[in-house]
Image (cartoon, rainbow, N blue to C red):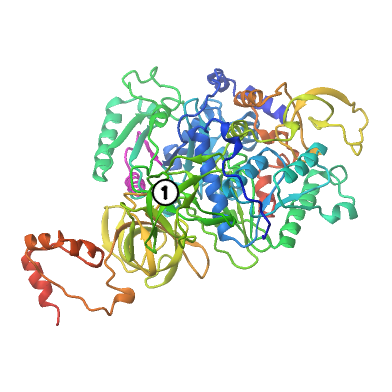
C-alpha cells in the first residue's frame, strides 16, 4: 500500500476524531515565548494517553504519522477508535520492545495562542535522573494521578524533584475521572491533599483539573457535558496562561562564550544574557578579574540595539581594552554574582558510578569550565522529605554537597537565577555528564588552598556582632567571614572543644 | 581559519525589518547560543549544508551568531549527484554571496560502481551515497563537531536526540546511552576521534522554519514554491521529470502539473505535492491546515518503521 493509501485508511478508521478538529484557526503571530512543561506520572496514570491526546486534539499528529501508528499497533485501538498513543510517543525501537519509556523525549504542539514544548519523562523511580533533566528547563509541571487511586508516593517524589529544579507552577491532572463516575467529592479530596503537599514544598500556584485523557475531557475540549460541576479551566487553557520564567528582574549577567575579533578595530564579547538587562553607558565588572568598564554598544546582526534583556544572544562592546576571555562573566557593577572557592549546592546524580567524595570533576556552568572537588553531605529521602547524612551519592540520589574549587568560581544562587546558579559535573575519566546541580550559597573559603591561613573564632553578643558587621571595614571583607548564630550555651560548648 | 576580512559595516542595512515575535526570537536566541558554544569548544567544526529550507535557516543563524565576523567554519555538502539542478545553482550562488567556505563531497563509489537510486533501490543508494559519503567527508576533514539542521518534531527517534549528540569514532549513535542534557549547559568533552553532531534547530517545528524564513527574508530554493513543472508518477509519488537521466518506465507518462516540494533531497526519491502556494504566506497557511507530515514525501523514511533510528545508528545525519 502506498503512503497516501495508508493515510486514507487511517482516516476512515479515525473519522470520529477528525471531526473534532474540523475548525482549524489560521495561526497568528505568537506573542509569547514557547511554554516548556514537564509531565510527571506513570503509564498506569495514563500519561501517554494524556500527551497523545494533547498532540491529537491540537492537530500536531499528521495523517501519515497516524497511519504508521495504525500500522504498528496492528489494528489495536482504544474504545474511541484512536490508535495506541504510546507508540507515537515511544520513539526508539529499544523502548517499544521493552514497552517502557526510558529517556526524555520532547514533543511539540501549539494552539492559536501559544506553542508548547513538552519534556516527556518516565515515571519509574529509577529514572529520577531523566525527570531532573526534563525539569531543568521547564516552566511548569503537570502531575498526573489516577482518580481511582489518588496521590501516590511517586506523586510526592515528582513534586519534590520538580520543586528542587526550580518549578513553581503545578497542574494536577486528576485523570480517569470518567471511571469514578465523575465523582466531584473524590476530585476535591485529591486536589485538597495535593494542595497541602505543594504548600509543604513552598509551591502556591496549583491548578487541579478533573480529566479524562481517553475521552478528551478537560484536556483541549471542555468536559462540561459530563462534569457540569466543574467550571474551572481545561488543561490547555491553564497552559496558555502560564507564565514563563524570566531572569530579567535580577542583576545583569553575560557569560562570555567567545571573543569576536573580525578586524583590528572591532572587539566584541559574545554570549547570551543570563540575567537582568544592559544598555549602552552601563558600568560593568568583568569577573573573576574584577576589572571595570562601560558598555558602548550592543551589536546584533540586525541593528545596533539600545538595550538587551535576559535571553538575548548579543555581542557586547566595551569602552576600554580589558582582558576578557571565554568563561568570564560580565556583570552589573552594582549587583554582582558571588565569587569564591567554596560553594554549597544540591545535585542529582545521573550515572551508575554516582558521585564519589574527593574525586575531582569538571564543572561547567554557563561557558565556564573548571576543576572541582565534591564533598557529599546529605541525601534526600524522597519518601519522607528528610535529608540524611551521606558520604557518597548513588545514581538517582538528590544530595547536598560542598564544592571546592582551585580557581575562583562565579555563581548566583539558583533561587535567584536559574542560569548562573546551575551547573553540570563531567567525569574526567569518561567525559560523561554525571550530575546536574544548583548552587544554594557560597561558603567561606575555609578549606582548599586557604586551609593553612590563620583565623580567629570570636564569640560575641548578638547586638555587638550586628554593630561590627554594619561597619564599612567589615562589609568590605564580608566574603572572608563565616558567621553562625547560636545560643550562648552552644557557643561555649563549641569554644570548649577547640584547642588553642 | 585565517582570512583577510574587510571591515564590516556595523549598521546593517537589513534593519528595516520589524522585530521578531517573542516565540521566534526565543528559538533564534537558543540556536545562536548553540552555534557560539560549539564554535568555541571544538577545534574543527563544520556545518552540514543540504541546501534545503532547514539548512537555509541554519546558515542564516550562523551568520547572525558570528556577526560582525565571518562564519568561522566551512559548509559541507554531501552531493549524491542526484540533487535537483536548481539546488546546486542556488548553493553556488549563496556561497558566493555570503563569502562562505564550501566543501563538496561525493562518494567515489557512486561513479565507480554506478550507484544510482534506480539501480540500487532507495535504501542501499542512501546508505552508500549519503550515509557512507558523510562518514568519508567527516573523516577526511577530521571534523570534531558537525552542525545539522535536524528538528525533534521531524521523526519519532529524533524526539529523544540531544542538542549535542555524541558519536563514536566510527560515527555511531547509541540512543540508549546518551549524555544527559540539563538547562542550556552542553557537555562538549570528547576524546580524539570522537565527535559531536550539534542541532541548533532541535526545538523548531516546520511552521517555525517557514515563519522565520518569512520574517527574516531568507532566500530559499525556488522549488519550494508552486509552479507548472514536468512530472512523472512513480510508486505513488510525483517525481520531477527534467533530468535526462530519468528514464520513463513502461506505462509512465510525462505531464505538466502545478506542484511544489515540501522537502528537497535527491530528485528521484522526493515526491512533489499538488499545491498552488506561490508565496510564503500561501505555504504557511497551507502548512497550518496540512494533514500530512513533511516526511511523507520521502521514500527513505517509509522503508520500515524505526528506519530513521536504524540509519542514524549507522551514522546517517
Q: Position of residue B283 (x, y in %)?
A: 66, 26
The residue drawn where x is 47% and y is 54% is B185
Q: Is residue A2 visible?
A: no
SS at badge 1 = loop
Where does the N terminus of chain B fall, quadrant-wise?
A: bottom right
Quadrant position of residue A441: bottom left
Left or right position of A303 against B227: left
Quadrant position of residue A73: top right
Q: Is residue A85 magenta?
A: no
User: Which residue sits furthest bottom?
Assistant: A500
Image: B304 above or below A327: above
Q: Position of residue B48 (x, y in %)?
A: 69, 50
Image: B6 above or below B301: below
Q: Position of residue A166 (x, y in %)?
A: 35, 47
Relative depth, front residue between A64 and A499: A499
Query: What residue span does the magenta drawing correspond to?
Result: A139-163
Left or right position of B85 against B26: right
Relative depth, front residue between A147 and A33: A33
Residue hosting label 1: A274
Left or right position of B294 against B245: left
Image: B250 above or below A276: above
Amino acid at each position: 500500500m502506498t503512503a497516501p493509501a495508508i493515510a486514507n485508511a487511517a482516516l476512515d478508521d479515525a473519522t470520529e476524531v477528525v471531526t473534532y478538529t474540523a475548525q482549524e484557526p489560521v495561526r497568528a503571530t505568537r506573542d509569547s515565548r514557547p511554554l516548556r512543561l514537564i509531565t510527571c506520572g506513570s503509564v498506569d496514570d495514563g500519561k501517554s494517553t494524556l500527551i497523545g491526546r494533547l498532540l491529537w486534539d491540537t492537530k500536531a499528529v499528521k495523517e501519515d504519522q497516524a497511519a504508521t501508528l495504525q500500522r504498528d499497533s496492528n489494528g489495536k485501538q482504544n474504545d474511541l477508535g484512536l490508535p495506541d498513543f504510546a507508540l507515537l510517543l515511544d520513539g526508539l525501537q529499544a523502548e517499544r520492545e521493552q514497552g517502557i519509556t526510558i529517556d526524555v523525549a520532547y514533543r511539540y504542539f501549539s494552539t492559536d495562542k501559544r506553542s508548547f514544548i513538552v519534556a516527556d519523562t518516565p515515571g519509574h523511580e529509577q529514572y529520577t535522573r531523566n525527570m531532573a533533566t526534563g525539569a531543568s528547563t521547564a516552566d511548569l509541571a503537570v502531575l498526573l494521578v489516577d482518580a481511582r487511586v489518588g496521590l501516590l508516593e511517586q506523586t510526592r517524589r515528582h513534586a519534590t524533584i520538580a520543586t528542587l529544579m526550580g518549578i513553581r507552577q503545578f497542574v494536577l491532572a486528576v485523570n480517569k475521572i470518567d471511571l469514578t463516575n465523575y465523582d466531584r467529592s473524590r476530585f476535591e479530596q485529591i486536589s485538597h491533599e495535593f494542595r497541602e503537599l505543594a504548600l509543604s514544598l513552598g509551591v502556591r500556584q496549583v491548578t487541579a483539573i478533573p480529566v479524562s485523557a481517553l475521552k478528551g475531557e478537560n484536556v483541549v475540549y471542555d468536559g462540561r457535558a459530563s462534569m457540569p460541576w466543574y467550571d474551572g479551566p481545561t488543561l490547555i487553557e491553564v497552559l496558555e496562561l502560564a507564565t514563563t520564567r524570566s531572569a530579567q528582574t535580577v542583576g545583569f549577567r553575560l557569560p562570555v562564550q567567545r571573543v569576536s575579533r573580525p578586524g583590528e578595530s572591532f572587539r566584541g564579547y559574545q554570549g547570551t544574557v543570563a540575567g537582568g538587562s544592559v544598555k549602552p553607558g552601563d558600568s560593568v565588572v568583568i569577573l573573576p578579574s574584577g576589572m571595570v568598564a562601560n558598555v558602548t554598544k550592543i551589536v546584533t546582526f540586525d541593528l545596533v540595539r539600545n538595550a538587551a534583556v535576559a535571553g538575548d544572544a548579543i555581542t557586547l562592546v566595551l569602552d576600554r581594552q580589558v582582558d576578557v576571555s571565554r568563561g568570564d562573566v560580565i556583570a552589573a557593577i552594582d549587583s554582582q554574582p558571588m565569587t569564591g572557592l567554596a560553594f554549597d549546592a544540591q545535585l542529582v546524580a545521573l550515572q551508575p558510578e554516582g558521585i564519589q567524595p574527593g574525586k575531582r570533576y569538571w564543572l561547567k556552568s554557563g561557558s565556564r569550565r573548571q576543576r572541582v572537588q565534591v564533598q557529599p553531605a546529605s541525601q534526600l529521602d524522597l519518601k519522607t522529605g528528610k535529608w540524611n547524612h551521606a558520604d557518597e551519592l548513588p545514581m538517582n540520589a538528590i544530595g547536598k554537597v560542598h564544592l571546592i574549587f582551585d580557581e575562583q568560581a562565579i555563581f548566583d544562587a539558583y533561587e535567584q537565577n536559574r542560569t548562573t546558579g546551575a551547573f553540570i559535573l563531567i567525569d574526567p575519566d569518561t567525559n560523561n555528564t554525571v550530575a546536574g546541580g544548583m548552587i544554594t550559597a557560597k561558603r567561606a573559603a575555609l578549606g582548599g588552598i586557604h586551609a593553612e591561613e590563620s583565623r580567629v573564632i570570636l564569640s560575641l553578643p548578638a547586638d555587638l556582632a550586628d554593630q561590627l558587621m554594619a561597619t564599612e571595614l567589615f562589609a568590605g571583607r564580608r566574603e572572608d567571614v563565616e558567621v553562625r548564630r547560636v545560643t550562648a550555651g552552644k557557643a561555649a560548648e563549641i569554644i570548649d572543644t577547640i584547642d588553642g | 581559519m585565517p582570512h583577510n576580512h574587510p571591515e564590516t559595516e556595523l549598521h546593517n542595512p537589513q534593519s528595516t525589518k520589524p522585530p521578531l515575535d517573542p516565540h521566534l526570537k526565543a528559538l533564534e536566541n537558543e540556536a545562536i547560543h548553540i552555534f557560539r558554544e560549539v564554535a568555541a569548544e571544538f577545534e574543527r567544526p563544520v556545518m552540514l549544508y543540504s541546501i534545503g529550507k532547514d539548512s537555509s535557516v541554519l546558515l542564516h543563524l550562523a551568520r547572525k551568531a558570528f556577526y560582525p565576523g565571518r562564519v568561522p567554519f566551512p559548509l559541507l555538502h554531501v552531493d549524491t549527484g542526484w540533487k535537483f539542478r536548481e539546488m546546486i545553482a542556488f548553493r553556488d550562488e549563496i556561497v558566493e554571496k555570503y563569502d562562505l567556505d564550501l566543501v563538496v563531497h561525493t562518494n567515489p563509489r557512486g561513479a565507480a560502481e554506478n550507484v544510482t537510486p534506480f539501480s540500487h533501490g532507495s535504501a542501499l543508494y542512501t546508505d552508500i551515497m549519503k550515509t557512507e559519503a558523510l562518514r568519508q567527508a567527516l573523516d577526511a576533514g577530521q571534523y570534531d563537531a558537525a552542525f545539522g539542521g535536524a528538528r525533534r518534531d521531524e521523526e519519532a527517534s529524533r524526539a529523544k536526540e540531544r542538542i549535542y549528540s555524541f558519536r563514536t569514532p566510527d560515527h555511531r549513535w547509541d540512543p540508549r546511552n546518551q549524555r544527559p542534557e540539563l538547562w542550556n549547559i552542553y557537555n562538549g568533552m570528547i576524546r580524539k576521534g570522537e565527535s559531536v553532531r550539534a542541532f541548533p534547530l532541535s526545538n523548531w517545528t516546520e511552521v517555525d522554519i517557514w515563519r522565520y524564513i518569512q520574517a527574516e527574508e531568507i532566500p530559499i530554493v525556488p522549488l519550494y514554491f508552486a509552479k507548472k513543472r514536468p512530472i512523472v508518477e512513480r510508486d505513488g509519488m510525483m517525481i520531477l521529470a527534467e533530468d535526462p537521466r530519468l528514464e520513463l518506465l513502461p506505462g509512465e507518462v510525462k505531464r505538466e502539473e502545478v506542484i511544489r516540494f515540501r522537502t528537497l533531497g535527491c530528485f528521484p526519491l522526493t515526491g512533489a505535492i499538488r499545491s498552488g502556494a506561490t508565496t510564503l504566506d500561501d505555504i504557511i497557511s497551507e502548512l497550518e491546515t496540512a494533514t500530512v507530515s513533511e516526511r511523507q514525501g520521502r521514500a527513505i523514511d517509509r522503508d520500515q518503521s524505526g528506519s530513521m533510528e536504524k540509519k542514524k545508528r549507522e551514522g546517517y545525519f
